[in-house]
Every structure is written in C-alpha cells, then in structure tokens.
Image (spheres, rainbow, N blue to C red):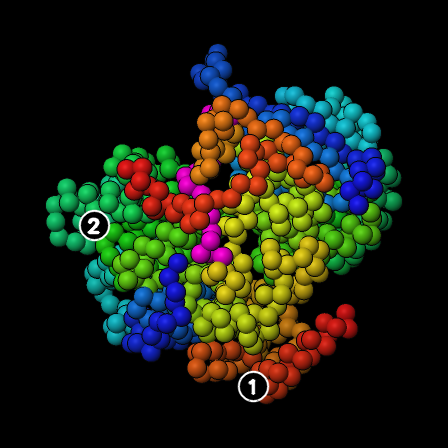
C-alpha cells in the first residue's frame, strides 16, 4: 500500500528497549524468557519481531506494557524508554494512562481478550472514557466510528453485538478498533493473524496497515510468519532463545541474512513461488528449553557452522555487519571468519548434497 | 502425460460424497430445524503413488471428507471405491480397511495416548491386524529409526517428546500396517516453522521408500503447493477447482482460487510488496454452511457474480487436461484493485 522506502530513519526513537531481561521464577528453575533484548522503534515505523514459539517475542511485548504476571515473572533489569521516560520506573497510575492511551496492544486470541458479557461497542466505549474527556454518547459514537473504520459492516448495529456473535476475523478487527480508538502512537500486534484463514488474514493486515498509517501510529508486529513480515515491515528483529539474533531493514535481512538461524529459517519454509517437491533444508533439532539454554551461542547445537571453540562456550554479542542498514547479527563466525566464507561453505555443501 | 496417467486405475475414488449434520432444537424431542451441509457432493480420484492435496479454509469440509472416507463418521450419501472395491457400505471395524487406509492427525498432543509407551502406541495397529505382539514390538525400533527417531525412544511416553517428535511417532504408527494410502490431516500446522520442514521431508522420503499414496489436507497453500502432485480446492463443502498442481496453482481459473493464492504472503520483501498492490482482498466472511447461498456458493464474495450465479449452481467442468472448474465464467479476471474491505463497507453504508 504505502511505499516505505523513502521514510526518514534517523529520527528520534519513540520507543527504546535497552537490555531488557524478563525472567520467570518457577519451581523447576529460572526461565530466562527475555535475556538482553534491545531495539528502537521510530515514529510511524512498522517493526517486525519474528521467532518461533518460546523465543520470547510475546514476553518482550508484555514487558513493554507492564503486563508480566508477578510472581512468577520479573523484569530483572533493563530500560524501556517511551519518548525518553522509563516505563519500568513508572507508577501503576502513570502506566495506566500510557497503556491504551499512548501504547496499545492486540492479542492473538481475541475471544479470550474480549469480555464475553459486555457488547463490543461497550468495551470500546469504556476504553475511550478511561483515556479521553467527553460524554458517554461521544465515546459510543467514537466506538461506532472505529468499528466502521476497520471494515465492520453496519457498525452502529454490530456495536450492540457480543463478541461471540462476531466471526474470528471480525473479532480481531474489533480488537484493532479498540486498540486504535484512543489514537495511540504505538500499537503492538501480537500474532494478529495466526488464528485466521488466509483470505481473512489479508483483510486484517490491510486494516492494520491502513488505520495505523492514517493515525501515524508506529506498529510492532509480532509473528512467526516470514511472509507477513516481508510485506508489512520496515525493519525486522529475529528472536531465538530469548535474544535478538539478527536485526536490520527488511530487505537487508531477507536478501543478505548473516546469522545461520535466519538463513535456516528462510531455507526451510515451503514457498508458493518455488517449484513443487523442491527439497526443503530444515534446521536440525528443536528450539532450546529456556530452563537450561545451551552454553555459548544458543543456536550452536542446531548450527551447521558452529565449529569455533567460542560457539560452545562464549555467548556472541550482537554486532554490526552493515551499519547503513542497521544490520546487526549475533554470531562468532560472521565476525571471525567473515560471512562471505561461511556463505561459500554453505553453497559448496549444497552442491555436494 | 495425462493420457498415460488416466490409464492407471485410481487407488481411491470418491463420488458425490455428502455429509449433512442435523441441527436440532429441544432436549427431549430434538426437532430437526435445519441442516449443516458440511460436505455436499464431493468427488475426486487419487492415483497410486501420488500426493493429492485438499486445500481450503477452516470449515470448508476438508477434514470431514477424510473422516467419511475412513468411516470415522457415517456419510449421508455418496460412494467410496478403494483399490477397486466399493467400501461405501463396509463395516467401520473391517480389518482390511484399517490396514490399507491410515491417518495422521493434526494435533500431535491429542492423538497419542498419554498412558502408553511409544512402543505400545506404534505396535498397537499391527497387533490388532493379527501380528504376534513379539513380532510387532520387534518392528517398532525399525519404524522409529525410519521416521527419524532413536531406538531408545520406544520406552518413553508421549509427554517426553516435542511436537515434531510426536508427529513422527504418529507417522510411525500409521506406517506399521503397511498401508496403501495415508490421509495426512494438517500434519505440520501445529509445528514450529523450523520443525515443519523436517516432517515434510520425512513424509516425502517415506513416500518414495514405501510407495505410499497421500491425501494431504491443509489450509496452508505454500505447504500444499510444495508437496502435492494434484490439488482440489474446497469452499463451503464443495470442490470449486481441481487438477494438477501446476494447473490449479499456476493457472487458476476459479475466482476463489485466484483470491486464495493472491492472499498468501511470500517471504520475499520486494516480491511481496509488488503482490500486495494487486492483492485480491475478499469481502466478508465465509457464509454459514447451515444456510449456504443459492446457486454458486462463492457468489456472495465474488465481485463478478451475475444473476446466473445466484440462480444456477455451476458444475465442475473440464477445462482441458483434467483441470476441472466449478464456475459459470471460468478464467474470469478480478477487476483491478478489487475490493478493499474498508472501501466496500463505506459503499454498503
């Protein structure tokens, strides 16, 4: 829809997450669900976070909004700077104003995120009343207006419906309407289309893109679907084992991936634009248990290139590989051997097999 | 090629398969107040050694179709011929049927008994088929290894495995009776992205090794496109388009297939941004199968629908080379920039 290539990238960040660590203290031990995550989101930018289940992407989002249940969860350290103000130092009262008013969030499962005993219109109205001055009537009108904006037909009538009377795609859109009703500057969409069919997914993604652009709101899009990320985002972070392992502008990341996990992910997914029966190149093994993550690089047990001493003993830092495109990768070999060499090795291996 | 293939007798032939669920009201008398037409006259053939993909959105009846063929559910009407034998009225507990036709389920957490070891789970179908338990247990190790697990996994319980490993156990169980045809009902959709490829490759390897025929059911078009030789696209209980994978996915003729394919996001930023510009975004939701539209079932979401579409139901007709399309106007193009759901509503209001 909108061309995002000419957007200024050097503006002051809206949100700046600095070395965030969110741990869960369970009977079985400490789960380091988010372990040193840093990223910035600029005004109006669409930032994607991709990763498999358990990689820490949803916990990162919930940490930003202060939605981590405590106990067992605890934000151990780090900073979450929202327009310069540290959200981790905010009182609950301050947080309540920001949450929904300035930063809002939509959840994967709208049926459990919406209250079943209130009408959809009432729930949006309530949100508007909390955050904005005005009468109940004007808040109701705002709710109807928002439902119309996200493409709910006959919004004035449907606002009187309960969530169970909506289809899955409509519920997701109603949640987006609610999230956008107080004109936030940032909206976090956690797996907005995972439970939806592909034609409904296209509707919902279009709604997110269009309404966020109309409001000038920035979007953090959390998903496991690389196709969705490719089309929607300006910049992407790939998460694995509670850490960001690669980050950069979307084209840079897809066309010049440097971290073996990102390579692996891109090579392992079946694609519509590829011939049938083309052999997939899966990543061996399974994602790590966050109770006992592997020593050294968290990806090393599954990595085809993990042959350095350091891979198994020292956790690599996120290092710049292409500063112009903000491209960072977390891999020893990229830095010590150089990515060209690793890439050539992979090509050779491919030819031999 | 098609003439050559057509000469081969089909392994499975499904004719006009129908399943209507009654909607009842009242606890005691259970008056019948309506019918959900979950599967409504579905016909297809599966040739030996091929992978037949059945694709469609949730609620289109693709899983029900599999359950009807497998007799896990009684059909309302229709005929099923497997390997030259009419199995429509065969008893569900027929042993030969259970030996030759197997299924791998979507949810690897719900489809394995948590109180049985993997050895018991994998051996059970063989023992039911009359293999001596000792022999059956002996074969488990080999099956597990072929499915990418280790021998020592046989003594463990399902909860000790990850989702991908459980799905491998489900595949090993299905293979034990040396079936001719396996229904794969969303076998990878519950798995993480990096694990999906492992299971897909395994399924393809086993197909070559055992000469298996697959009916692959999935909602993910990329997955179906990757693995299938022939494909049928379902919408609201009916097949709307079927043919070879290249015919259906590269030269789709039904407006629904076109919309479905255009909606799939491709993990390539430049290509995906270009695709978005011409993306066909369907309006509204799938209508209820309890009250499907008259005529063509897709007409309520089709921008090109005419009066004919509302009055007459289009039948699956051959467009050449076994490419069947159920549309009055096969090959019709969607108008440019059709239908943003946002603009369409303002037009309605």
Residue of label 2: A128
Query: Cα distance, mark 1 to mark 2?
Result: 50 Å
Which residue is depicted at the point 80% across and 38% down? B6
Residue of label 1: A335
The answer to which quarter of the image holds residue B134 is top right
Query: In the picture shown, does residue A71 fall above or below B166?
Result: below
Work out whether residue A266 or residue B348 is closer to the camera in this orientation and state it: B348
Q: Is residue B278 left or right of residue B151?
A: left
x and y percentages locating residue B261 in the rendered image: 55, 49
Which residue is depicted at the point 45% across and 65% down? A49
The answer to which quarter of the image holds residue A78 is bottom left
Chain designation of label 2: A
x and y percentages locating residue B117 in the rendered image: 71, 48
Q: Is residue A112 left or right of residue A83?
A: right
Work out whether residue B169 or residue A160 is closer to the camera in this orientation and state it: A160
The answer to which quarter of the image holds residue A350 is bottom right
Which residue is depicted at the point 21% across and 50% down? A128
Which residue is depicted at the point 35% across and 67% down? A45
Work out whether residue A239 or residue B62 is closer to the camera in this orientation and state it: B62
Q: Look at the image and tell me whether residue B117 can be seen.
A: no
Work out whether residue B84 or residue A95 is closer to the camera in this orientation and state it: B84
Q: Mark 1: give few (<14), some (14-19) or many (20+) Cα within 10 Å.
A: some
**SS category of the residue bearing label 2:** helix
> Majority secondary structure of the magenta segment?
loop
Which region is colored magenta? B275-295
Task: Point out the image quarter for the C terminus of chain A.
Answer: bottom right
């Amino acid at each position: 829809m909108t061309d995002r290539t000419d957007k200024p990238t050097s503006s002051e960040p809206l949100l700046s997450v600095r070395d965030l660590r969110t741990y869960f203290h369970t009977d079985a031990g400490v789960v380091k669900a988010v372990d040193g995550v840093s990223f910035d989101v600029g005004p109006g930018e669409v930032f994607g976070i991709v990763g498999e289940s358990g990689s820490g992407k949803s916990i990162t989002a919930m940490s930003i909004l202060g939605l981590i249940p405590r106990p067992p969860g605890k934000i151990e350290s780090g900073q979450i700077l929202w327009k310069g103000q540290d959200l981790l130092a905010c009182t609950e009262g301050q947080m309540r104003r920001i949450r929904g008013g300035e930063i809002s969030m939509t959840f994967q499962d709208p049926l459990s995120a919406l209250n079943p005993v209130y009408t959809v219109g009432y729930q949006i109205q309530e949100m508007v009343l909390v955050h904005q001055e005005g009468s109940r009537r004007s808040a109701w009108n705002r709710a109807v207006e928002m439902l119309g904006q996200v493409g709910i037909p006959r919004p004035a009538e449907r606002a009187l419906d309960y969530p169970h009377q909506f289809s899955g795609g409509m519920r997701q859109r109603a949640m987006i309407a609610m999230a956008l009703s107080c004109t936030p500057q940032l909206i976090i969409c956690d797996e907005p289309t995972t439970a939806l069919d592909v034609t409904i997914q296209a509707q919902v993604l279009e709604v997110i893109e269009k309404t966020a652009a109309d409001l000038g709101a920035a979007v953090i899009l959390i998903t496991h679907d690389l196709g969705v990320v490719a089309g929607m985002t300006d910049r992407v972070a790939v998460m694995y084992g509670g850490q960001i392992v690669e980050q950069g502008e979307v084209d840079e990341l897809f066309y010049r991936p440097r971290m073996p996990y990102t390579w692996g992910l891109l090579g392992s997914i079946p694609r519509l634009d590829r011939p049938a029966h083309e052999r997939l190149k899966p990543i061996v093994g399974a994602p790590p248990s966050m109770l006992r993550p592997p020593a050294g690089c968290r990806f090393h047990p599954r990595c085809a290139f993990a042959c350095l001493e350091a891979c198994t003993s020292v956790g690599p830092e996120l290092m710049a590989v292409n500063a112009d495109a903000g491209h960072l990768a977390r891999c020893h070999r990229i830095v010590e051997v150089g990515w060209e060499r690793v890439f050539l090795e992979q090509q050779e291996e491919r030819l031999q097999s | 090629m098609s003439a050559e293939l057509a000469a081969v007798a089909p392994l499975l032939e499904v004719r006009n398969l129908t399943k209507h669920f009654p909607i009842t009201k009242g606890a005691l008398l259970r008056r019948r107040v309506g019918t959900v037409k979950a599967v409504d006259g579905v016909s297809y053939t599966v040739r030996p050694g091929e992978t037949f993909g059945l694709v469609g959105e949730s609620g289109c009846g693709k899983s029900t179709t599999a359950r009807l063929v497998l007799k896990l559910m009684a059909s309302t009407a229709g005929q099923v011929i497997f390997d030259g034998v009419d199995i429509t009225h065969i008893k569900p507990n027929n042993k030969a049927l259970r030996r030759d036709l197997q299924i791998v389920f979507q949810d690897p957490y719900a489809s394995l008994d948590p109180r049985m070891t993997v050895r018991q789970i994998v051996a059970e179908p063989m023992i039911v088929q009359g293999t001596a338990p000792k022999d059956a247990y002996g074969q488990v190790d080999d099956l597990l290894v072929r499915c990418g697990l280790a021998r020592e996994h046989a003594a463990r319980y399902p909860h000790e495995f990850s989702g991908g490993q459980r799905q491998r156990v489900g595949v090993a169980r299905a293979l034990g009776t040396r079936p001719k045809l396996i229904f794969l009902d969303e076998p990878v959709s519950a798995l993480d992205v990096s694990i999906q490829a492992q299971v897909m490759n395994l399924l393809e390897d086993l197909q070559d090794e055992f000469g298996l025929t697959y009916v692959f059911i999935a909602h993910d078009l990329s997955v179906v496109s990757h693995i299938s030789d022939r494909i049928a696209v379902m919408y609201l209980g009916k097949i709307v388009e079927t043919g070879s994978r290249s015919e259906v996915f590269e030269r789709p003729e039904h407006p629904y297939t076109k919309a479905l394919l255009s909606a799939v996001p491709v993990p390539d930023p430049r290509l995906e941004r270009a695709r978005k510009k011409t993306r066909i975004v369907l309006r509204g939701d799938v209508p209820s199968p309890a009250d499907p539209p008259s005529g063509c079932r897709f007409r309520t979401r089709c921008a090109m629908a005419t009066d004919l579409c509302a009055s007459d139901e289009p039948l699956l007709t051959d467009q050449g080379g076994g490419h069947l399309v159920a549309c009055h106007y096969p090959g019709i193009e969607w108008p440019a920039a059709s239908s943003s759901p946002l603009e369409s509503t303002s037009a309605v209001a």
